[in-house]
Amino acid sequence: MKVTIIHRPSGEKEEVEIPDSSTILAALRAADIPPDVTICMVNGGPVPVDTILKDGDRFEAVTVVSGG
């Protein structure tokens, strides 16, 4: 199945192919996005990486940056 990841803050869209009933974590890995520095959002709210996706789903991957 195909899902779309919207990278934040850039707004770039990336479509990845993952097996049916896969999770957001699988989609992040398919896109080489490190899950430990990413917050995933659906409909403006955060969701856990074990959220199961359906074909055609879209989610935002927000990269967290910290420092001093």
Image: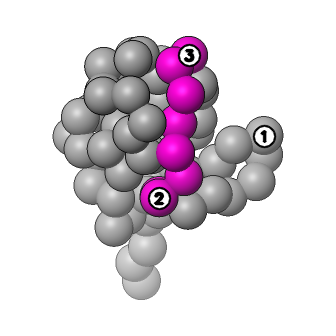
One can see residue 8 in this view: no
The kind of residue tagged 2 is Asp
Q: Between tags 1 and 3, which lies in front?
A: 3
- Distance CA(mark 1)–CA(mark 3): 15 Å
Identify the residue position indicated by label 1 in the image: 43
The kind of residue tagged 3 is Gly
Identify the residue position indicated by label 2 in the image: 50
Identify the residue position indicated by label 3 in the image: 56
- Distance CA(mark 3)–CA(mark 2): 17 Å
Q: Nearer the viewer, residue 23 or 60?
A: 23
Q: Earlier in the sequence, mark 1 or mark 3?
A: 1
Q: Residue at image x 51%, y 19%?
A: 55
* Residue at the extreme front: 21
Q: Which residues are magenta?
A: 49-56
Q: Between tags 2 and 1, which lies in front?
A: 2
Q: Nearer the viewer, residue 57 or 67?
A: 57
Element assignment for label 2:
loop
Disc 2 crowd, CA 10 A, few/some/many (<14, 14-19, 20+): few
The spot of residue 58 in percent (x, y) is 59, 27
The spot of residue 50 in percent (x, y) is 47, 58
Q: Looking at the image, is 12 positioned above or below residue 8?
A: above
